[in-house]
Image (cartoon, rainbow, N blue to C red):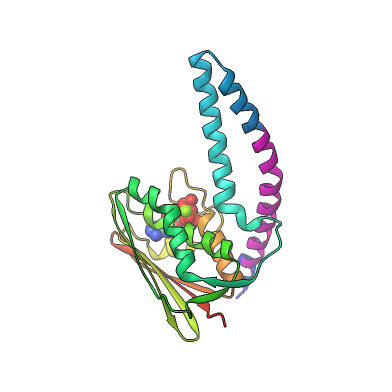
Amino acid sequence: MLEKLIKAEKLEVVSHLAASISHEVRNPLTTCKGFLQLSYEQEKSPEVKQYLGTAIQELDRASDIINDYLTFAKPAPEKVEKVSVFQEVHNVVNVLTPLANMQDVQIFTNLDESNQNYISGDRKKLEQSLINIVKNGIESMPKGGKLIINSVVDYPVVRIKIRDEGKGMTQQQINRLGEPYFTMKNNGTGLGMMVSFSLIKGMDGHISVDSEVGKWTSFTIEFPMAY
Ligand code: ADP
Ligand code: MG
C-alpha cells in the first residue's frame, strides 16, 4: 500500500513536469523549425543543405516525442464525451499502419460495431493511450508478425484487447511497466506506458497485462460503458 502511494505521488510529479515541459518547449521548437526551413529553401550549397535537413529531422523527432507522449499534458480543458471505441481503434490503426508496414507487421481488428461500444472520456486521450500500447506491440516484433485488436461489450464494461506475437516480457519487466523512464530499448523514452496508464486511469479504466517471454504479450483494457 505504501509502495503504491509513493508510486502515485511520483507519477503526479512527473505529469506536472511533463505538462510544463511540453508547453514551454513546443514554441521554441516551432520557431527554430521555421527558420531552418527558410534557410534550407534558400541554401545553395548541397553540403550545408544536408546539415540543415538533418537539423530539421532532429527537431521533428523532438516534437514527435512531445506530440506522441505528452499531448495528454496539454493544458487544454478536458473534454468528456461519448466516444466510439470502434471509430477510435480505426483511427489508431490508420495512424500506425505505416510503422507496421515498415516492420512486416499485420494489424487485424475485430470490433463490436453495436451502438453499445462507447465509453465516456476524451477521444484524443483514448487514442493516445492506445497508440502507445499498439506502437510497443509493433516494436516488439522486429521480424514481423500479427497484432490483433479486438473489442467487445460485456455489460457493464467495454473490453479492448491488444495482442502481439512479439518478444514478450518477464514478470520483473511487467512489474516495472508504467514506471517513468523504464525502457528496454536503445532509443526508447520509457514514457509511453506511463502515459497510457495514467490516461486510462483518468477515464476510470483498468489495464492488465499478460505475457510469455519470446512468444506474445496481451494487454486488456476495460472501461465502463457509456450510456
Ligand atoms: P519505450 O517504448 O520508449 O521503451 P514504454 O513506456 O512505451 O517505453 O515501454 C516500456 C518498456 O516496456 C519497453 O521498453 C518494453 O521493454 C516493454 N514493453 C511494453 N510493451 C511491450 C510489448 N508489447 N512487448 C514487449 N515488451 C513491451
Ligand atoms: Mg513505447
- The quadrant the C terminus occupies is bottom right
Q: Residue at x 52, y 22 (%)?
A: 51
The x and y percentages for residue 99 are: 39, 48
Q: In this view, does 92 lie to the left or right of 103?
A: right
Q: Residue furthest bottom?
A: 155
Nearest to the observer: residue 32 or residue 170: 32
Look at the picture and state if 17 lies above or below 61: below
- The quadrant the N terminus occupies is bottom right
Q: Give the range drawn in magenta.
A: 8-31
The x and y percentages for residue 159 are: 44, 76
- Is residue 52 in view? yes
Look at the picture and state if 5 lies above or below 154: above
Q: Which residue is drawn at 56% across and 23% down?
A: 40
Task: Report which quarter residue 39 is drawn in.
Answer: top right
The x and y percentages for residue 108 are: 33, 63
Nearest to the observer: residue 91 or residue 206: 91
Query: Is residue 23 one of those drawn in magenta?
Result: yes
Q: How many marks?
A: 0
Query: Is residue 38 one of those drawn in magenta?
Result: no
Q: Residue at x 37, y 61 (%)?
A: 169
- Is residue 133 in view? no
Q: Is residue 178 left or right of residue 81?
A: left
Nearest to the observer: residue 28 or residue 116: 116
Task: Report which quarter residue 26 is drawn in.
Answer: top right
Q: Residue at x 58, y 49 (%)?
A: 67
Label the magenta part by its dominant secondary structure: helix
Quarter of the rendered image showing ligand 1? bottom left
The x and y percentages for residue 65 are: 55, 46
